[in-house]
Amino acid sequence: MDLTLYWFMFPVAIVISTTAMLSGIGGAALFTPMFLIVFPLLGAEYTMSTAVTAIAAALLTQTFGFASGFIAYRRQGLIDYQSALPFIAVAVPIAILGALLSQTADANLLKGTYAVLMAILSVILLRRPASVEAKPTIGAAGAGEVRELKARDGTRYRYTAPRQGLGAAATGIGALLTGMVSVGIGEVIMPQLVKRHRLPLPVAAATSVLIVISTVTAASLAQVMALIAQGGIAAVPWNLVMYTIPGVIIGGQIGPRAQGKVSETTMVRAIALLFALICIAMGWIVIADLIGG
């Protein structure tokens, strides 16, 4: 095992993790296509052995990145723990199920599912309206329990407590996809918290990080344990994650500190465009494999 092979992923991981913390999306949404699309272009020695290995590496990396982001947001006092629990209760067991299902799924099915998901997320992001502004006198939208959260800097946020309700279906689908293809939960949670429940963006992003880290941790453990059970400890690409994990830990600290300093509209549009490009590239790979096969 060449321990220097993936050295370049350290700075790349910092950038990806910072972006994920700012936008609330899962970092694996960017890591997985990099492992599956970019690595093979660099040479045969960089290619992951299977799509499941790439997904497991992305999930394991994302776990540490969001753990770092969670610590940063916790210090800022922006996480609404009570609101996060109903989402976590739905997402965690379903994510584990998705991770187990991916072990027997066809590689092209996983890649094709990922391509379709990227297309859907691209459209959702482009249509996502501006979030509620982070002001000290935010009012609650709609009927229900009014919750107030005081951040470490003294800012007070008032909003209606989110209820899972019919959103449980979206949460469940996002969790299943996270377990199977490493992306989905963050992308369905943020729109729910911001668009449907009208949480202030700083509170929504911080609370989303708690939900995502809980879900991704469960999925990554299931994926890694399955890999080890099938191929031993060497089945996990340790020479890759030894660079990505420190990178995302650093990015997880940078992102929350930069919250509010980057235009949300610009960030969302850039990520939507990137997702569209990933969809095209991943779809092309699947078609080429099917034709070649």
Image (cartoon, helix red, strand yellow):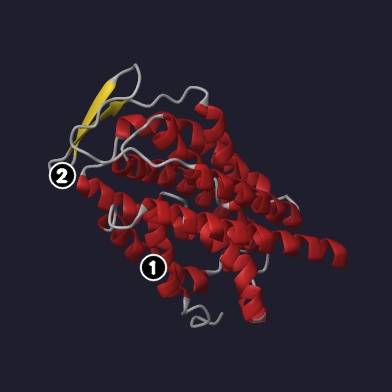
Q: Is residue 293 visible?
A: no
- Where residue 113 appears, as percent x and y from the top left, is 68, 49
Residue at the image position 66 percent from the left and 75 percent from the top? 40
Q: Earlier in the sequence, mark 1 or mark 2?
A: 1
- Kind of element beneath mark 2: loop
Residue at the image position 59 percent from the left and 37 percent from the top? 173
- Where residue 251 appears, as percent x and y from the top left, is 35, 63
Residue at the image position 65 percent from the left and 52 percent from the top? 114
- Where residue 291 appears, as percent x and y from the top left, is 86, 64
Nearest the camera: 12 or 104? 12
Residue 274 occupies which quadrant of the picture? bottom right
Which numbered circle lies on residue 130? Answer: none
The residue tagged 1 is 14
The residue tagged 2 is 152
Residue farthest along the left direction in this orientation: 154
Looking at the rendered structure, the kind of residue marked 1 is Ile
Nearest the camera: 92 or 129? 129
Residue at the image position 48 percent from the left and 68 percent from the top? 241
Characterize the local packing of mark 2: few (<14), some (14-19) or many (20 or more) Cα atoms within 10 angstroms.
few
Using residue 167 as the reference point, say whether residue 283 is left or right of it.
right
Looking at the rendered structure, the kind of residue marked 2 is Arg
**Looking at the figure, which quarter contains the N terminus?**
bottom right
**Looking at the figure, which quarter contains the C terminus?**
bottom right
